[in-house]
Image (cartoon, rainbow, N blue to C red):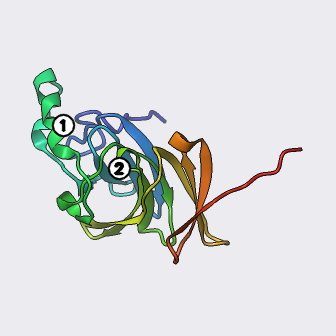
């Protein structure tokens, strides 16, 4: 069975989904969630029905529909830091993602805003809110469903931190060496 690159025009996806440096991938139910770092967007691809959509962040067609160098200048307009719904939510270089406490929620590291955000998918859009801030260049995240803890690679501080899901309390993870 041949594979079709999801970021290419034509083929599998109807809306000409293009990526500008996809970094994080998370599967949930029938969806693949894609963190597009330089595009500052969160996308979903329905793997059963074959459609895709931008659910959070900017989805400027001038950027996604063209590969001309002049469009790269418009990327600055996509960046920001705001919680919100759909295209009103803003990220600044989101990099990693992980499933969260339900199939329609993912965690995203908003690296240059030094935050971890929760993206809750509902219908054709998503609500974004900050789970924790005051991190230092976070680039990895994973959720432990059993313990209800979020582990974050706080890359700029050379540490792993733990976020208690309901309390939004950041704890440093200490290891003993052997």
In the picture provided, is 46 more to the left or to the right than 163?
left
Residue 80: percent from the left, percent from the top? 23, 50
In the picture provided, is 129 more to the left or to the right than 109?
left
Front position among marks 1 and 2:
2
Residue lying at the far top of the rendered structure: 69
The local secondary structure at tag 1 comes to helix
- Residue 28 against residue 96 in the figure, above or below: below
Marks 1 and 2 sit apart, C-alpha to C-alpha, by 16 Å
Mark carried by residue 159: none
Report the residue marked by disc 2.
113
- Residue 68 against residue 63 in the figure, above or below: above
Rate crowding at label 1 as few (under 14), some (14 to 19) or many (20 or more) other CA atoms within 10 Å: some
Q: Residue at x 23, y 34 (%)?
A: 9
Report the residue marked by disc 1.
75
Residue lying at the far bottom of the rendered structure: 166
Please identify the quadrant where the C terminus is shown. Answer: top right
């Amino acid at each position: 069975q041949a594979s079709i690159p999801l970021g290419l025009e034509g083929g599998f996806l109807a809306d000409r989904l293009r990526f500008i440096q996809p970094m994080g991938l998370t599967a949930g139910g029938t969806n693949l969630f894609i963190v597009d770092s330089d595009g500052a967007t969160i996308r979903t691809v329905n793997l059963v029905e074959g459609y895709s959509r931008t659910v959070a962040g900017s989805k400027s067609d001038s950027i996604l529909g063209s590969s001309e160098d002049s469009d790269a200048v418009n990327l600055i307009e996509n960046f920001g830091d705001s919680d919100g719904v759909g295209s009103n939510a803003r990220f600044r270089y989101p990099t990693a993602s992980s499933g969260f406490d339900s199939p329609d929620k993912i965690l995203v590291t908003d690296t240059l805003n030094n935050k971890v955000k929760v993206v809750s998918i509902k219908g054709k859009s998503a609500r974004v809110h900050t789970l924790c801030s005051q991190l230092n260049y976070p680039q990895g995240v994973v959720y432990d469903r059993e313990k209800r803890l979020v582990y974050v690679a706080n890359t700029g501080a050379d540490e792993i931190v733990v976020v208690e899901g309901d309390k939004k309390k950041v704890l440093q993870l200490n290891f003993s060496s052997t």
